[in-house]
Amino acid sequence: MKSDSVNERAAANLSSRRVSGRCLCGAVELEIDFPAFWAWHDHSAASRLAHGAAYATYIGCWRKHARVAKGRGSIARFEDAKTESTRSFCSRCGTPLLYERKRSPHMVNIPRALFTGRTGREPRYHVAIEELQDWTYTGERLVPLKGYPGIVRERPKSRRRARDVDDPEFFHRRGTQERVLTVKFSQ
Ligand SMILES: [Zn+2]
């Protein structure tokens, strides 16, 4: 009997646990009830553009388990008619905050990166993986870049592969900064 009450108490604590996330400037804080419903990586073009990133990683929550804890007045919204979705972001710092889809009215999606702590779900699912960009880092082995502390790089996959023009070593060997810029912007 004793262990039952301990379990009940643990379950109660778990269900009442809240985790919070925030935008870059801190004007907006979001809060969800732990755990999130699910988590996934979104490789679709709309999320890629909205985040300015290779892909976006979201946690999905029931709407009733997510709330704006602070800064409601700082939230701006963009209605995307093409995908029938609404994206909210901080009007001060631009951080994406909420991604809501018309076809899932009871769910709200929040960028995983806003939360520093655990959200209760690992992002093991991928949406639109066929749109994965060939410049996305997917875990290749990295080595230090000589002369640039803190920067690591991927080794070229094979000797036959053409060197990328944005390889700093390539720049240094081949000429001046002006020439580098010419190469970069003439692509
Ligand atoms: Zn902000």
Image (tube, helix red, strand yellow):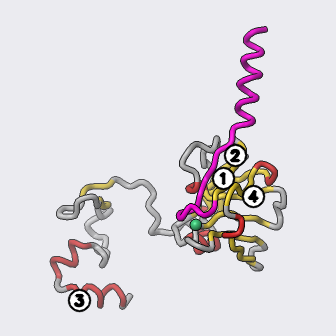
| Separation (CA) of disc 1 from disc 4 | 8 Å
Q: Is mark 3 within 8 Å of ligand 1?
A: no
Q: Which of marks 2 and 3 is in front?
A: 2
The residue beneath circle 1 is 59
117 or 175: nearer the viewer: 117
Q: Residue at (47%, 65%) from the top-left corner?
A: 136
Q: What element carries label 1?
A: strand
Q: Does the residue labelled 4 lie within 8 Å of ligand 1?
A: no
**Callout 3 touching callout 1 (CB < 8 Å):** no
Q: Is mark 1 within 8 Å of ligand 1?
A: no
Q: Quadrant of residue 12?
A: top right
| Separation (CA) of disc 3 from disc 4 | 48 Å
Q: Residue at (71%, 25%) from the top-left corner?
A: 10
- Measured as percent of width and height from the top left, residue 107 is found at 79, 56
Q: Is residue 43 left or right of residue 137?
A: right
Compared to residue 186, the image places residue 21 above or below, namely above
| Separation (CA) of disc 3 from disc 1 | 44 Å
- Measured as percent of width and height from the top left, residue 36 is found at 70, 46
| Separation (CA) of disc 1 from disc 2 | 6 Å
The label shown at residue 36 is 2
Q: Is residue 123 left or right of residue 73?
A: left
Which badge, 1 or 2, comes first in the chain's sequence? Answer: 2
The residue beneath circle 3 is 179
Q: Is mark 2 on a helix, strand or loop?
A: loop
What amino acid is found at the position of numbered circle 2 in the picture? Ala
The label shown at residue 108 is 4
What amino acid is found at the position of numbered circle 1 in the picture? Ile
Which badge, 4 or 2, comes first in the chain's sequence? Answer: 2
